[in-house]
Amino acid sequence: MTKRALITGITGQDGSYLADLLLEKGYEVFAIRRRTSVPIMENIAHIADRIEIIDGDLLDISSLIQAVKISDPDEVYNLAAQSFVGTSWDQPLLTGQVTALGVANMLEAVRIVKPTARFYQASSSEMFGKVVETPQTETTPLYPRSPYGAAKVYGHWMTVNYRESFNMFACSGILFNHESPRRGIEFVTRKITDAVARIKLGHQSELRLGNLDSLRDWGYAKDYVECMWLMLQQEQPDDYVIATGEMHTVREFCEIAFGYVGLDYQDYVVTDPKFFRAAEVDLLLGNPAKAVKTLEWTPQKTTFKQLVQLMVDADLERVARTYSHISPVTSNA
C-alpha cells in the first residue's frame, strides 16, 4: 500500500529535498502551506504537480486538524519554523509562537486525528548554544543563546513529552548546520556564495559579514533529509544528532568559495559589527555516532569543499541567468 506523508515547511530547503526523496520512494506527498498573496514556490516548482497543497498555519490548530484529516498521513514531518537566528532577536515573540508553540499545535493535531502516524520534529544544534561539552551528542545539556534556540528547545522537549505521555512514535532530529543551493539567501553560507557569483560576474564589489571565526559543523541538506526518513522507519522512536563530525570557520567557507572562482576573499570581505549576534555561539560540533550505528547513515557523502563548490556553481548559473546579457563565467575547479 502506498504510504502517505504530510510535510510542513515544504517550500524551504529541507522540505523541498525531503519531498523529492519521498516522491522517489513512491509516497503520496501532502504539504501544509501558509497562505501568502504571492506563493513562494521556487524550491518545489519542479514537483508542484505531484504534491497536494493544503492551506494551513502552525498558529491555527483547527487548520492543522483539518490538514491531518485530509492527508490521513502515515508519516508527519514538521519542518516549518521561523528559522533564522538573526530574525529571532528582532521578532522573539513570533519566533516563540511559530517555532515553539507551533510544534505543540502540530503534535496535538496528530494526537487528536491520527495518533498512529509517525512524527518527525526538526530540532537544531542551536539548542546547544553555549556548549558545555564538545562534541555535542544526544545527551549534551542544552544552553540556547537566542530566541530561536530557546524555541527549538521547547519544541524538542514537547516531542519527547508526547512520545512518553501518549506513546506516540515521535522523533527529533538534532540537525547541525546543513546547506545547499536551496538555502535562504539570508543565511551566511548562501550569502557568501551569492556574493561570490555577483562579484565574479561584476555585479557586486564587496561582502559584509560578521564573525569570520565562528566554527560550525556543515553538511549537505540533501544528505541530511535521508536521516529524517530513516528515523521514522525504525522499530522504536528516538532522537538523533545528525552532523559530519567536522568543524570549519566562516573564514574557511569564504576562502574556498572565492578561491573556486580564482579570487582572494581578503580583497572583498569586510567585517561589519552589525552582523555579530547579540549572544554569540562560538562553536558547534556534532557527534553522529548514534545515527551512524542505528540508522546506518553515512556522514559526509558530500564533503565540505564539494558542498561549497556546488553552491557557488548554482549561484553562478542563477546570477548569470538573471543578468542574461552577460556571458556566463566558468569557475576554476
Image (cartoon, grey):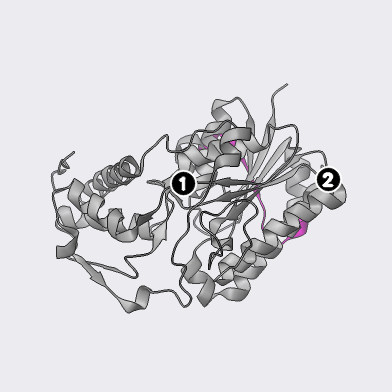
Can residue 242 be seen here?
Answer: yes
**Type of amino acid under label 1:** Gly
Percent position of residue 234, x then y: 70, 32
Residue labelled with disc 2: 113
Q: Which residues are magenta?
A: 48-62
Identify the image quadrant of the N terminus: top right
Residue 49 covered by magenta stretch = yes
The local crowd at label 1, few if under 14, some if 14 to 19, many if 20 or more residues have their Cα within 10 Å, is many
Identify the image quadrant of the C terminus: top left
Q: Is 61 situated above or below 328? A: below
Q: Are marks 1 and 2 in contact (CB under 8 Å)?
A: no
| Number of the label disc, if any, that sits on residue 245 | 1
Pick whichever, 274 or 241, lies toward us.
241
Percent position of residue 32, x then y: 64, 48
Pick whichever, 33 or 239, lies toward us.
239
Percent position of residue 129, x then y: 54, 66
Residue at figure coordinates x 34%, y 69% from the top left: 211
The local crowd at label 2, few if under 14, some if 14 to 19, many if 20 or more residues have their Cα within 10 Å, is some
Residue 23 covered by magenta stretch = no
Q: Could you say which quadrant of the image residue 330 lies in?
A: top left
